[in-house]
Image: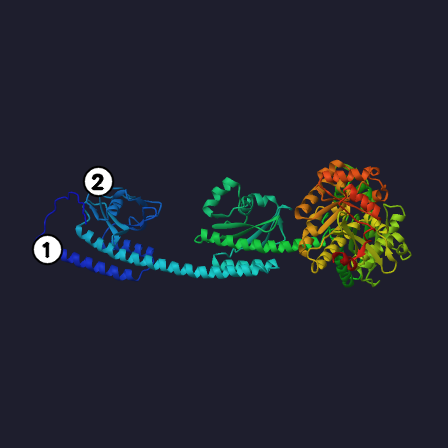
Amino acid sequence: MTTVASQKPEIQTPDPLTAELVRLQQENHHLRLINQFAIELHDLSNPDEVLDYAAKQVVAGLGFVDCAIFIFDAKTQLLKRKAGSGTRDLPVHLGVAELSLEQGLVGYAARQKQSVLVNDTRQDPYYVPDYFPSLSELVVPILDQGELLGVIDCEHSQLGFFQSAHQLVLEKVASILASKLRKAQMLQRLEQSVSQLEYAERLQKALYQIAAFSSFADEFSGFYQRLHQIVNSLIYAPNFYIALYDDATELLHFPYFADTEDDEIDPNQAFGKDVLEHSLTGYVFRTNQALLIDKAQMLAFDRAHQIRIYGSVPECWLGVPFVGSDTIRGVVVVQSYMPHIHYSERDLELLTFVSQHISNALERVFSEKRLQHQALHDALTGLPNRSLLLDRIEQAFKRMQRFPANQLAVMYLDLDRFKAVNDSLGHPVGDAFLVEVGRLLKNCMRQSDTLARLGGDEFAVVLEDIGSVQDVTEVAQRICDSLQQPILVAGHLLQSSCSIGIALTNAREGLTGADELIRRADIAMYQAKQDGRGLFRLYQEHMGRQDSEEFQLDQDIKAALTQQQFQLHYQPIFALGSPRLLGFEALIRWPHPQKGWIAPDQFIPFAEQHGLISRIDRYVLQQAVAQLVAWQAHWPEHCYISVNVSGLAFSEANFATQLLELIADAGIKPAWLAIEITERALIENIAQARTALKELRLAGVKVLLDDFGTGYSSLSYLNEFKLDVLKIDRSFIASMKPKIQDNPVINTVIALAKTLDLLVVAEGIENQCQCELLKSLGCDAGQGYWFSRPVPAADAVCWLS
């Protein structure tokens, strides 16, 4: 132990006996003090309480004016004031609160691990004045087996106040304190370990619960409430909310909001950009980064980011972002209004994990809702489709039974001359026109009315709670007037109109079938077209449109699709160089239950004109894929089936995606299916054709160009599009001459195909002469009556065998 002492003033020496008595009394007092200190310290366990008690006892027991205890931080290598008594009982921002090992007598004693007693601080170069300067100072290090734990520092305004006896007592106090601190630290670490273990167990259990119920959540209010309960069991979270922002609508809403200070927010209430741009929640949305901020930081944050607090100002705020779907983003937030409760990085990690499970649950439910929406809505316009329309009408019937005073009406709309728009300007303009028409129709209706697209250029409107016929005719007239105005679409000013059929019913009539109500409206629509177009007509019993050939054909096609009356017959395609089967072309056939076989040319043109061809295309593709699956069980390496696809279906933006999904769901190889498209289908929508062809061929689906030579026969686009097969139209085959040199067109087509590395298939081969001549010209394959007529699937298996 080293003691540094300054020159002391002369004092009168007492007689030896008195001096010894005083010494023994002081020593006895100090022993009692140390003994009492050790006993009372035994009952304390918290390190802060231990230090605070020690500082106070030093001042009270030794008659000092102050005492400060510094604890050594090994990480920062700093001595930090943790307790003070007397004139050193100061707030942390006053006096010397931190010292390095190089500063002051405190730093010196800590560095040397020895006590320091200074009788005159004015003469000591290490002295650093505190809030109240002193003239003498006693510093004793707190050591545990040579390891520095801290320092006890006492100062006095009187020169030479501290004696060696004080130093001895303070060293005993430091020794007891070191032992107690070490035990308290060990106990605290043990308690922290136990607490962390218990927290980890609770956390694991809670996170498992979150993962489990988020996987099956189908009702969000209950999901959010259960989530809140679990989060609140782990961290302080009575104030908890979830915010969702839709990028598509640019609206913010709070589906769950729990707060002890502010009123609840309606989950259906939407907020605009102002809240998004000037709130803490909006800041997390904009930056896509978590934010942990306390009340003291909010003022500066407000100035830097123009943020204002909505509602009560929290003491601490923690928000974590998450992604809910392609367009939905979210933020989960906890906040504290208690000054002593602040959030930590551990809380941030927990909330981040919670946000991931919210994201997973939302994505799953949104995906299901998206699929449900796709199943019940038109892909082009986003309007309800026939399935949803029928459901809405059925629900309307039920409501009408409860409120019999009101009527129910259905309007059937068909655009006049829409086919001319498609034929002259192409399908992209036609599609854009339909979307704009849908928008105009919605503007003519009430909020409670349902507008649906039935396919092609046909729409339907359901009007509930109708008081009179005039209520319906007013809506119909608004629609007619609106659609008679020129519509600007893709730079084209288009003039159109629509024919509307209206069917009404009420509870007294007893009609309960949605299909019948639509049928009546459809009949009235045909009457409106017959009367001059651009008109509306109310259904009357005398309207005999049921017997109309066109109307009946429309109904028969729709029934055939619903009842799967259409059949596929398969015509084999053979290599001309050898008797090898390459594939089949699937051709639609219609055995009508009453009218017998109806030829394709009697219904395909009608279906194209009235917007039914896409439904027929999808039907044929589904049947062909189902046949491939059936054949796969017996002939795993059989050949392909090619299906004719109309230009209307091929121009749909999601055609390739839906076809590949159909193939994947069936579990067949894409190379087993081929599609046949005409030159017109390619030319009408070049951009869409290029995208679809690339997607299909990349997946392995063959693409055949059908009826080559009957359309544009453009070499430029034939070179641009990547195809697999070129099919020569049967009209060229039928007019073939016996000599090779007398068939320049076919010769040129085959030579062109070879140059472009395309296979050539000839359609309509009906005799051996044609077959041999085509083989001589270099044609790769052929089909026709010479080989086989189109036959049912049951008869086609003989070629597979």
Q: Nearer the viewer, mark 2 or mark 1?
A: 2
Q: Residues within 10 Å of mark 2 (few under 14, many from 20)?
A: some
Dot 1 crowding, Cα within 10 Å, few <14, some 14–19, many 20+ = few
Is residue 428 shown to the viewer in this render?
Answer: yes
99 to 188, vertically: above or below? above
Left/right placement of residue 592 relative to residue 51 reads right
Residue 29: percent from the left, percent from the top? 19, 58
Residue 207 on image: x %, y %: 51, 59
Residue type at tag 2? Arg
Q: Which residue is mark 1?
A: 18
User: Where on the picture, by quarter, is residue 597?
Assistant: bottom right
Which residue corresponds to mark 2? 122
Indicate the position of residue 647 as horizontal and vertical percent values.
Answer: 77, 45
Tell me the kind of residue under disc 1: Thr
Q: How many marks?
A: 2
Is there CB contact under 8 Å for labels 2 and 1?
no
- Name the N-terminal-most of marks 2 and 1: 1
Query: In which quadrant will I find the C terminus?
Result: bottom right
- Say left or right for 66 vs 304: left
Residue 466, quarter of picture: bottom right
Residues 666 and 90: in front is 666
Q: Nearer the viewer, residue 265 or 208?
A: 208
Foreground residue among 424 and 573: 573
Q: Secondary structure at mark 2?
A: helix
What colouring style does the render use? rainbow
Question: Where residue 136 is drawn, which disc sits there?
Answer: none
Q: Would you say residue 498 is visible in this rendering?
A: no
